[in-house]
Image (spheres, coloured by chain):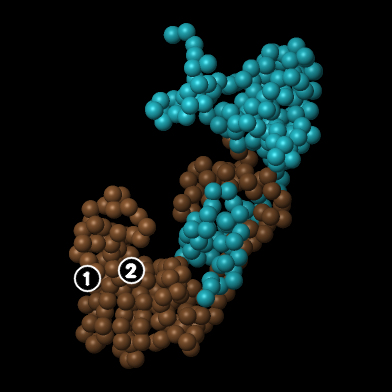
Chain colours: A brown, B cyan
Amino acid sequence: MDYPLAVQKLIDELRRLPGIGPKSAQRIAFHLLRGSREEAERLGASISRLLDGIRLCVTCNAITDREVCGHCGDASRSDRLICVVEEPHEVLAVERTRDFKGRYHVLHGALSPLQGIGPDELKAQGLIERVRNGGVDEVILATSPTVEGEATAAWLARLLKPLGVRVTRIAMGVPVGSDLEWADEITISKALEGRREY
Amino acid sequence: MDYPLAVQKLIDELRRLPGIGPKSAQRIAFHLLRGSREEAERLGASISRLLDGIRLCVTCNAITDREVCGHCGDASRSDRLICVVEEPHEVLAVERTRDFKGRYHVLHGALSPLQGIGPDELKAQGLIERVRNGGVDEVILATSPTVEGEATAAWLARLLKPLGVRVTRIAMGVPVGSDLEWADEITISKALEGRREY
């Protein structure tokens, strides 16, 4: 005996979302079933219409509903510094620090031969052009500290350095507020390697 | 600087779902943004139309798309045994055991004075009538082993016993496959109390 078809279909579709397993999918479906029809219709419409009017910033590839995103259009930010991230939501992760007042560049991925993602799949050409056009002093490579992120950073550094720009990589180390006891050996090794004068 | 309005609106709506925090909501929204428009539209439509044609079984209150649910309409099941659960999805949890061949009754909640859920908010009247109409030998109270579930079971037992039906409660104890070391003291106490001859 199964759920009604509409319920089973929704559970199957929810399970394809990141971080949603069979139990969460079921919980969400039954939460919606208990709620009002208006509530389900509102959420459904938000998802259906999500991509209407959404596009990538012509300069940095961030997700925006205008031609140029808010960060690229903000005159108070410096053009001299570009922070390169893999994914659009990582722009907000950097923004939350309130420490960065430069521009961004979103690659929309990282090099991953296993997943068939090579240089041509990444949106890096625009970055090269931005640097080549001049006015950029430093490119901060803020790709993730993973095998893919490291490979992408190394590849970008090789492309960018000959253009005469300073290329830096974010620091890797023990996360603030965490206990050394729980850090893995590679992180600790990176933290030792990146040690600074006290 | 924020996300485009459509993205922020979806993240806010996703956060209202059970088990979805701010990070998960963001991950899901960006997953959909990376996907095709068709994919987002399909999921959106499944949610919008979820409640079309969905109703509660006239006998047991299970969620169904017919007048009488599959379990109530199944002639191979016994009318003599009714398993009472709090929520519709718990019917499937019991079904997965493949051990139960009786009927169900879904209360759609449990007594909870703190949340303002009293006897009138539960769909228990139909259960009383089913027992009163005769042909039922035993009612298994499979409400959760929580304060609310226990209160609900005690209340139902008080209503049902005078009707001459056998009323039983599911066993509480240490979960199969778990380590005694990790069980809390109340569970162990229940497991001791419910011990059986070996």
Residue at 28 percent of width and 64 percent of height: A172
Q: Position of residue B176 (x, y in %)?
A: 44, 25
Give whichever of B71, A104 is nearer the camera. A104
Which picture quadrant has residue A197? bottom left
Q: Position of residue B12 (x, y in %)?
A: 59, 61
Give the answer, above or below, for where A3 lies relative to B136: below
Question: In the image, what residue occupies the spot 24% across and 62% down?
Answer: A191
In the image, residue B74 sits, relative to residue A13, either above or below, namely above
Is the N terminus of chain A in the top left, top right, bottom left or bottom right quadrant?
A: top right
Tally of numbered tags: 2
**Residue extending furthest toward the bottom:** A134
Q: For this view, does A133 lie left or right of residue A14?
A: left
Element type at mark 2: loop
Q: Amino acid at mark 2?
A: Thr
Residue A197 tag number: 1
| Element type at mark 1 | loop
Judge by depth and name the residue closer to the eye, A45 or A75.
A75
Are discs 1 and 2 less than 8 Å apart at CB? no
- Image coords of residue A183 (percent x, y): 29, 53
The answer for which chain carries disc 2 is A
Q: Amino acid at mark 1?
A: Glu
